[in-house]
Amino acid sequence: MHIADGIIATEVCIAADAISLGALYAFGKKTESGDIPRMGFMGAALFVASLIHFPIAGTSIHLGLYGLAGILLGIRAFPVIFVALLFQSLIFQHGGLLTVGLNAINMGAGAMAGWLVWKAGSIPESIRAFSAGFIGILLAAFLMAMEFQITGYGRGAFFIAYIYSIAAAVEGVLTLTIINFFKRAKPDILEYGK
Amino acid sequence: MMNGVIFLTSLVIGIAGPGLEHGIEVDFVKRAPSVIATCSYSGSGPVKNAEVLVYSPGEGDDEYQKGGTDVNGVFAFVPDAPGQWKIVVDDGHGHRKETAVTVTEEFFLSEETAQVPGEDAGTGEIGFTDLPLWLRAIWGLTLIFGIACLLYLLKVRKLIQSGNDRA
């Protein structure tokens, strides 16, 4: 899920970094003081989530929590994902430093999609929660697979879609579990993204 | 709010535990005349059938050897000169590791076996990445919480100042 340096052309990575910095400003400006602790905690959770990984089909995939970030933070998920990715790259060498912008776009898009699904009020809440977690990972993986396909890298988009659909199901269940917990413990936290 | 975030972070940190890093790790065994590399997703099994490129010291971008790992994540090459050999492992799914191994003059004269971890490509120095994973995770969490606290304090200070100005 985290694209390493040296896979995508440098020019593309720099362009993605520039777009990401623009999005960082757009989605991060006018952040209210009350949002910051929530963003800090979500950033910490995203930062360590990638350490939870499991082997599948000869490769290794990990949790992302992008859908959950979308539910809990709305558009503020993007700056949080960007910062978490930056620290993952610097501290764990998980994903490249030059590709932080590209990874942030992929995963930020997943979070935004999760947020949009969560806002679809006509669908039962448990289905929305599962779908947000599911789509959060799957869209990020889909974008990554498309980028690999365009650049001619790797073992094919279909294989990536296959392995990440399993990860998306795990993520969907986890997101649903966490949302159910928040519903009991602190329901107003779920109103933020709506 | 606090219950929720404590639950969330505990859940994530609790499941993660130490030693569960996701990236590719490469360990080398030097056994003249070969250097044998074992590639693994740390704590998550071998990097099977990955592409491996070997670059000899001072040869720039010209590949010395192009090959792949076996089902156990192992590959080997036979160096022909002392120096720092660059190794690039790519599993084709976005996981990529650039590392290096130093081959000394003594390597060619002896048949001794030595096991060494991969080095930072280009420098050969032991750096921040050699710290235990749990320590780096705590370091990162401290930074993230520190930044959040700093931003919060700045925001609150601004609010207090604007309130005082109005008063």
Image (cartoon, rainbow, N blue to C red):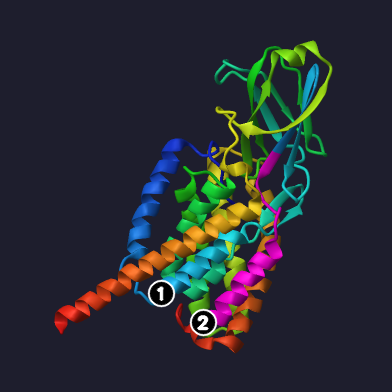
The part of the image, by quadrant, that contains residue A48 is: bottom right
On screen, residue B63 above or below A97 = above
Expressed as whole percent of the image width and height from the top left, the position of residue B109 reads 78, 11
Q: In the picture shown, does residue B65 fall above or below B2?
A: above
Subunit that carries the residue with mark 1: A
Residue B4 covered by magenta stretch: yes
Quarter occupied by the C terminus of chain B:
bottom left
Label at residue B1: 2
Q: Which residue is mark 1?
A: A35
The magenta segment? B1-25
Question: Measured from the top left, where is residue A142 in percent x and y?
Answer: 58, 55
Residue lying at 62% horizontally and 68% vertically, measured from the top left = A134
Residue in front for this viewpoint, A160 or B151: B151
Which image quarter: residue B16?
A: bottom right
The location of residue A24, given as percent across then percent down, is 37, 58
Please state the chain letter of the residue tagged with numbered disc 2 in the rendered image: B
